Image (cartoon, rainbow, N blue to C red):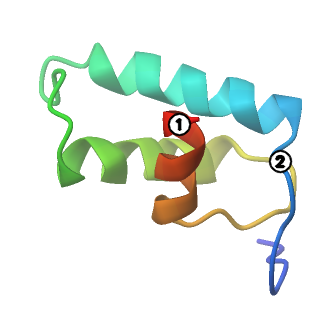
Amino acid sequence: GFVVKGRSGNYTTAEDVLICTAWKKISQDASVGSDHGEHLLASIKEYFDEHNTSGHFRSSDTLCQRWST
């Protein structure tokens, strides 16, 4: 896919919604549960990457920071 190098800037509304959707879907998965460890974050990152159409690359760290915001 398309990867933007350097800082990607602010998250779009669509990306914010996607983070929330990913967290909801992944946290309701019985095999993941509400674990807040690396497995949950990796699953959210995978879901986000598969569905993100913004063209911005978002690292696991920035997704985690955005979620905490």
- For the residue pair 7 and 30, the one nearer the viewer reads as 7
Query: Could you say which disc has been placed on residue 34 in the image?
Result: none
Where does label 2 land, which residue? 53
Q: Residue at x 34, y 47 (%)?
A: 41
Query: Could you say which disc has been placed on residue 67 in the image?
Result: 1
Q: Amino acid at mark 1?
A: Trp
- Residue at the extreme front: 69
Query: Height in image: 62 above or below 30?
Result: below
Q: Amino acid at mark 2?
A: Thr
Label 1, residues with CA under 10 Å away: few <14, some 14-19, many ≥20: few
The percent coordinates of residue 45 (x first, y second) are 47, 51
Q: Residue at x 44, y 26 (%)?
A: 23
Quarter of the image where the N terminus is located = bottom right
Q: Residue at x 20, y 49 (%)?
A: 39
Instruction: Provide the secondary structure element on which disc 1 rests.
Output: helix
Q: Nearer the viewer, mark 2 or mark 1?
A: 1
Sequence-first disc among 2 and 1: 2
Label 2, residues with CA under 10 Å away: few <14, some 14-19, many ≥20: few
Query: Height in image: 65 above or below 30?
Result: below
